[in-house]
Image (tube, rainbow, N blue to C red):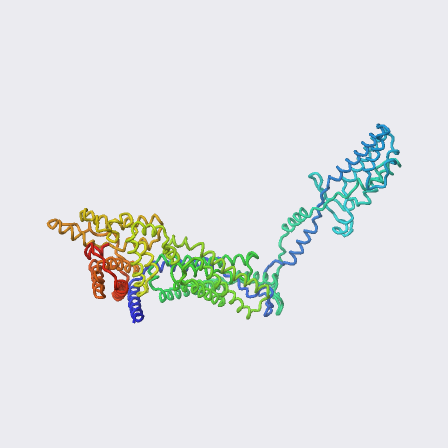
Amino acid sequence: MTFSLRKKNKRIAERKTETSLRKTIDAKPLGIAAVLWFITLLLFFGSGVVPEINLVEGQKAPATIIASVPFNCENLSETSFAQNKAASEVPPIFIINTEYEEKAIQLINAITSRLNEYHQSSINQKKQIQQSIQDLLLGTDLKADLLINSFKENEIINFQQEMSNAVISVLNKGIISDEVRMTLFQGESSHSLTVIFNDSEKTLSLNNIYSVDKSYKDFKSLISGNDNRMIAEYIDDLLIRPNLTYDDTKTKARRNQAIDKVKAVIQSYPAGTPLVSADEPVTTQTLLLLRAHKEQLLKEKDLNERRLETIGQSILLLAALIATSILLRLIKPELLKNPNKLILLAILSLFTLTFARLLTFLSMQTTIVPTSSLIYLVPYAFAVLMATILINGGAAIALGFWCSFATAIYFDQSFSVFVLGMFTTVTATTAARNMHKRSSIYKAGLWIALVNILFACIIAIFNQPSLLILAEQLISSIISAVIATGLTLILIPLFENCFRITTDITLLELSDMGHPLLQKMAIQAPGTYHHSLMVATLAQNAAETVGANSLMVRVCAYYHDIGKMAKPEFFAENIQNGNNPHDELSPHMSAIVIISHVKEGLALAKRHKLPKPILDAIEQHHGNGLIHYFYNKAMDINSNDNLNEADFRYGGAPARSPEMVILSLTDAVEAASRSIQKPTPQKISNLVDEIFSIKLQDGQLDYAELTMSEINTIKESLIFSLTNMLHGRLAYKPDENLSKKSAD
């Protein structure tokens, strides 16, 4: 019975909403739609239509494609050949190692120094010096005594100078090892190389560079005298070593510079040139030819033809936008009266479409985004996830339909693009429904990735791409899901603040009874704390009966009376031992104290940065209602004076949303229920009827977005819940009459 009643109330509400929509046509939604349509046109078609490239690299061409117009295109193989040639013309770079020259001169100086010491030393010292000379000659067949006997004391200096000059002369010319000659130059002497020595460089022929054998010969030829030449032959391998070191880093850098200077080789292709043959594997060059041919076709199109094409695409987009509006009206008609949320949907859709445009640009201009994986990288799920969390699933479905349709038009009316977008939309909407914590977004991202992968595999059955391309598509599907999930986690708080939207995730975080405000209220105003918990339970049950946001009602109920913490002892639920402070105050002053808890609550909520629904709950749970008890008391005291009724009214606004109406009614009913002695179902029913009647007569429900049928359903829910809660409960001793209890 309850279910059928809810369906009936829902139909009444829908008819009411549809009637209001027919009577008033708001210009704001039309303006938002027009701006969205225009921006989309500029975004997609301002820079031209996406070239139609149905083939992917590695795929076999289904048919031979022949150029219908002459065009120019880069020849990748010729460009590569020119680059390789330019790189090969850069000679390898060698660095002269000066360390070998320094060591050779040091050895010559050490030998000649020991020879001088030998001739000037005593007989006892000569043997020791001779041994030191022999140590210096280690690795050669030269004996120290032969070297000593070869020179008179006055000949040593000339020997030293001659050997030093010969070493410097040979090493400065440069010596390359035989191993390097064979590996780097293949033993050919016609090559050139660049030698860097002392911050200067010169390019030489390999013929002008010493080999090891030739360096030995020239070294000995620079030594005069047979005895000296004989000594030089013994120690040449100690003094002369290959001192040219190949610098691979500098060589590669210089060759890369040469490659960068090579211009792309542009080749002309006349009409009738086969661009790809049937069953021929598609290469990078093939795709480049097809793209260049398509671009040339677009350039040579007749102006009228291009205008007609643009008009046709514009009409398709407009049709998609109209279809989206109809879908939105069917699913969520009240959304059309909320420009704020419509702007949010427009921004989310433009983000998705802009991302698609950017990916296409990167695919056409660079190799970062493979053409075969382009459609799988578009993050449809981001906009859908955001819309589901921030608004609802119905709005997300409509948004996903628009983004999928518009993107499909952009990708040359591709049906597979539209289907992929809708697959993602349904998956993201389903996964994000009833999302109660931020970590659930990761689970939604996993489902989106799995669905995208499944779709890619299904498409692969028909297109039969190579394994490499299929792997790229699968990876792109995962990347798209990761991007959508990451952006959602990052941007949800920003969109909540900018558009003043409170998600269920935020509400659930605020429902934690460990929140500082709730903990403080439990200590400072325990009666108010208990009252808030009771109101939350009653209001949540009532909200569920009329399809309102029960979570929002419950959380708002927790915080609606936080302002009472400023002066808790002045409110009935916190008064103990019968000591009522209002007995010592005038009715005017008591009313001021009671009214002030709304203002204090708003200030406290803003200080703790509580969201707008809670601020509305604090302001609207009493509306601008009259505090009957103190007003009547003032009338009794000042029966001859005219009282200003406004002094005894709350300064808030009457409740508007279903959630705030439910909270206002439940708050009054729960407070008044404490005065019932020996509660019975009839007493409870009479009390609730009276409270609802007071609210109606006082105009507190004049702006409620609820039908009378729904209000009656709320009443029945409260009666049912209170009857169960108060059954068998001892009655509270009433300190004040019904009107005062309802006001608090």
Asked which quadrant contains residue 163, the reply is top right
- Which residue occupies the foreground of this view, 606 or 514? 514
Asked which quadrant contains residue 29, the reply is bottom left
x, y percent for residue 140: 83, 41
Please state if 427 lies on the left or on the right of 530 as rendered: right
Which quadrant is home to the C terminus? bottom left
x, y percent for residue 602: 30, 50
x, y percent for residue 355: 48, 57
- Which residue occupies the foreground of this view, 622 or 251? 622
- The number of numbered discs placed on residues in the rendered structure image is 0
Please state if 207 lies on the left or on the right of 635 as rendered: right
Residue drawn 74% across the image and 47% down it: 192
x, y percent for residue 132: 81, 35
Asked which quadrant contains residue 215, the reply is top right
Please state if 645 lies on the left or on the right of 113 as rendered: left
Evaluate whether residue 707 shows in this view: no
- Which residue occupies the foreground of this view, 104 or 141? 141
Residue drawn 76% across the image and 38% down it: 101
Residue drawn 52% across the image and 65% down it: 453
Position of residue 167 relative to residue 29, above or below, is above
Which quadrant is home to the N terminus? bottom left
Evaluate whether residue 573 shows in this view: yes
Residue most extreme to the left: 640
